[in-house]
Amino acid sequence: MARRQKPKMLSQTEVGQILAAAECLMNTINRASVRTDTDQYRAMRDINDAVWEGAKIIAGSDRPWPIYSSVGPC
């Protein structure tokens, strides 16, 4: 049985799927209203930070998602 060699990078489709899931998770965390002095809040903040850092690495950019502005391009 031959071993399949894994690719070195994700495909654009996989990157898009991962970034979409990460954005959904971050939006869910940011919408939650929990007091800031609780362990749950600190845990959600830590998860949010980790997802953000991972998304930046996967996207290969400091802005994994487009920034939309009402005054024009950033």
Image: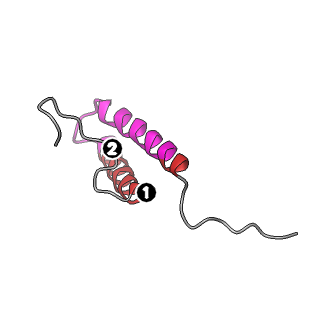
Location of residue 47 in the rendering, given as x and y in whole percent from the top left corner: 37, 49
Location of residue 44 in the rendering, given as x and y in whole percent from the top left corner: 35, 44
Which numbered circle lies on residue 30? none
Examine the structure image and report whether residue 29 is included in the region drawn in magenta. yes
Q: How far apart are marks 2 and 1 (CA)?
A: 11 Å
Q: How crowded is mark 2: few (under 14 residues within 10 Å), some or many (20 or more)?
A: few
Q: From the viewer's perspective, is 63 left or right of 72?
A: right
The residue type indicated by label 1 comes to: Ile
Q: Is residue 34 above or below residue 58?
A: above
Overall secondary structure of the magenta stretch? helix
Instruction: Identify the image quadrant of residue 74.
Output: top left
Location of residue 37 in the rendering, given as x and y in whole percent from the top left corner: 22, 42
Q: Residue at x 42, y 35 (%)?
A: 24
The boundaries of the magenta stretch are: 16-41
Residue at the outermost right position: 1
Q: Nearer the viewer, residue 41 or 64?
A: 64
Split into 4 quadrants, where in the image is the N terminus?
bottom right
Residue where numbered disc 2 is placed = 65
The residue type indicated by label 2 comes to: Trp
Q: What element carries label 2?
A: loop
Residue where numbered disc 1 is placed = 58
